[in-house]
Image (cartoon, rainbow, N blue to C red):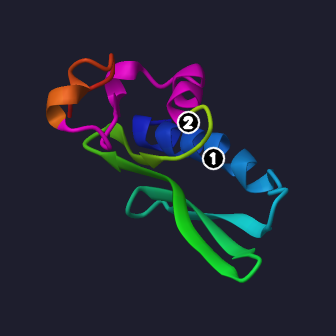
C-alpha cells in the first residue's frame, strides 16, 4: 500500500470516532465529509442550540504534496497527536493554521 492510501485510511480512522461523540447541550451532530479524490477531510458540526443555528467546521485536513495539512482543529486535545500515534511522522504533518514564521517552532513540518 502506498503512502497516500495509508494517509487516507489513517485520517478516516482518526476522524470517524468524533462523529459518534454526542453533544450534551444541544441537538448537534458531527458529520464527516471525506473527499478522497481531492484529499480533503472535514468534520462539520450542525444542528440547533435552542433557537440558534449551529453550522461550522470542527476539523479540516488536506493531503498536499505527500503531507497532511491540518487546516483547522477545534477538537479538545487535537487530532495531530492522534495522527502521530497512528504512525504519521511529525515531519509529514503541517500545522497550516499557524503562520509560516510560527511553524518552524512547532516540531512539525513547515510546509
Q: How many marks?
A: 2
Foreground residue among 23 and 87: 23
Foreground residue among 62 and 98: 98
Residue drawn at point x = 48 percent, y = 39 percent: 7
Q: Position of residue 45 (x, y in %)?
A: 63, 65
- Where disc 1 sits, the SS reads helix
* Picture quadrant where residue 46 is located: bottom right
Q: Based on the picture, tell me whether residue 87 belongs to the magenta stretch.
A: yes
- Badge nearest the viewer, 1 or 2: 2
Marks 1 and 2, the one that precedes in the sequence: 1
Residue drawn at point x = 63 percent, y = 40 percent: 14
Q: Quadrant of the C terminus?
A: top left
Q: Which mark is residue 79?
A: 2
- Please give the residue where the numbered disc 1 appears in the rendered image: 15
Whether 48 is drawn above or below 1: the answer is below
- Where disc 2 sits, the SS reads helix
Q: With 91 as the anchor, is 33 left or right in this view? A: right
The answer to whether the residues at label 1 and label 2 have Cβ atoms under 8 Å apart is yes
Residue drawn at point x = 14 percent, y = 29 percent: 101
Whether 96 is drawn above or below 77: the answer is below
Q: Residue furthest front?
A: 51
Q: Residue furthest bottom?
A: 51
Q: Position of residue 66 (x, y in %)?
A: 31, 38
Whether 77 is drawn above or below 44: the answer is above
Residue span colored magenta? 79-99
Amino acid at each position: 500500500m502506498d503512502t497516500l492510501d495509508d494517509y487516507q485510511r489513517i485520517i478516516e480512522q482518526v476522524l470517524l470516532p468524533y462523529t459518534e461523540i454526542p453533544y450534551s447541550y444541544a441537538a448537534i451532530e458531527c458529520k464527516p465529509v471525506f473527499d478522497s479524490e481531492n484529499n480533503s477531510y472535514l468534520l462539520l458540526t450542525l444542528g440547533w442550540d435552542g433557537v440558534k443555528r449551529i453550522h461550522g467546521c470542527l476539523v479540516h485536513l488536506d493531503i498536499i504534496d505527500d503531507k497532511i495539512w491540518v487546516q483547522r482543529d477545534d477538537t479538545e486535545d487535537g487530532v495531530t497527536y492522534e495522527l502521530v500515534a497512528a504512525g504519521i511522522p511529525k515531519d509529514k504533518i503541517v500545522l497550516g493554521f499557524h503562520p509560516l514564521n510560527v511553524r518552524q517552532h512547532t516540531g512539525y513540518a513547515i510546509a
